Image: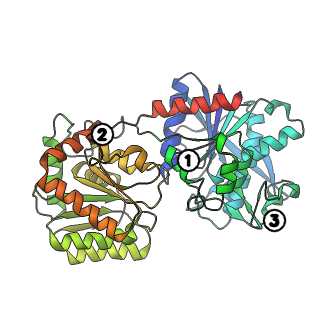
Amino acid sequence: MKILFVVGECLPYIKTGGLADVIGAVPKILAKFGHDVRVVLPGYTKIDREKFNFKQTIKPYMVNHRGVDYFETVLESDYTTGVVTYIICQDEFFNRDKIYGEPDDEHRFLFFQKSVMSLMDKIDFYPNIVHCHDWHTALIPVYIKEAKKYGAWKLWETKSIFTIHNLGYQGRFDAKVLLDAGLSFDLFTPDKLEYYGMFNFMKGGLVYADKITTVSPTYAKEILEPQNGWGLDGVLRSREKDLTGIINGLDYNDWGPEGDLNIPVRYSVYKREGKAKCKEVLQKALGLDAKHEVPMFTLVSRLAEQKGFDVLAGAIRDLLSNTKAQFVFQGTGEPKYEKQAHDLARDFPNQVKYIDKYSEQMARMIYAAGDIFLMPSKYEPCGLGQMIALTYGNVPLCAYTGGLCDTVFDIDMSDKGNGFLFSPVTYDNCRENLWRVYDKYTNHKDIWERVTTNAFKSKFTWDESVRKYEEVYKQALN
């Protein structure tokens, strides 16, 4: 198959979140499986052209947006093995401090999507599958279907796939943006692109794509319900037969204690002494008591209500007040939750350390040193942190939602459990389950040995996930 990924970010070129990890993995595995795979993303000036060997291979071309003709340059790289990557460069739209969150994002990503439609012609690449991701690329399925209506025979065999990474971010804008998109106002109806009087990018992908995927089987079920559908559950229920949940994978060449050079001692499920040493090193570095018998709870996360921090902080305070448990947090987020983390570190200086900036090296140290990894998200489409924690033997305590309950299984429910789950995310439940895990660690060494062994052995490979994407592509083509 010829497959074109249209995305807003991609490792190793540019990253703000988990989407980049997905696109950094899936295309190269599809290429390994024998497909002709290309990736196109905006040419943010933050992308290092020299490092990634981007070169100009086609002449600049012109794209009209809002009555203005913009010349753009397309650069090409073969840095990712087996995958050709294109970046569409236009400084007015992509020379910004931020990747997302600019006041004119609707026009930045409209321009990008129009440019992608022109690019297929310029490079003479008409794919079997165009795979689009999140609202920034959600109009590509609309453009393809509309182009076919007007006789675009080169796209006749092209099918579109749309993947939801987080339904909460939809790209809702004023109705006039529909005209800026170059689309007919005939499409501004409740069964197409209209959303309570607004123009909704993501709705375009959900209505027009041939198949829809999201990043875990449980999340695919959750978003069909009003409480999790962010106003689009009705649209999703109408497309339920075309919706598939495929769990994200983890690149075990990059993550894992056996080969991670960022941690002081390498270790594995069969040589665990190194994990104890990693814990001791981090405790000493942060000024905590270097005691193995004291459980270290860890968190690497954005501090936000979605992540459960609004109720978690109080529950942590209760455990700290009654035990010698240690907590190590890394992350930034909403100011009120950053303050709560700072307050915990101030009130319990011998038990709590809060690192209020992100460092990948420190994150890897926390994954490697920790005993328990906290992820009480109120919703989590897939989650990456719990998968990373598992491979380092850092046992997850998670909410029963989305991809968390597709990857973490409660040890109290099965001898094969690799962590702890609870629901719903309330103060009382957080408090009760922090105590449950504390008790298992301190008083039930046999259970703790079993749950950590199961955690170490948990694997969620990209190869398995990509085979499922292949099946969705074949279904679309058929």
Q: Name the residue under label 1.
A: 220
Q: Up-down: is 232 above or below 415? A: below
Q: Name the residue under label 3.
A: 176
Separation of disc 3 and disc 1 at Cα?
A: 31 Å
- Going by the image, does 60 lie left or right of 370? right
The residue positioned 69% from the left and 57% from the top of the image is: 108
- Residue 256 is tagged as 2
Picture quarter containing residue 287? bottom left
Amino acid of disc 1: Ala
Q: Where is residue 378 in the image (x, y as percent from the top left)?
A: 45, 62
Amino acid of disc 2: Gly
- Residue 232 is tagged as none
- Going by the image, does 399 lie left or right of 205? left
Q: How crowded is mark 1: few (under 14 residues within 10 Å), some or many (20 or more)?
A: many
Separation of disc 2 and disc 1 at Cα?
A: 28 Å
Separation of disc 3 and disc 2 at Cα?
A: 49 Å
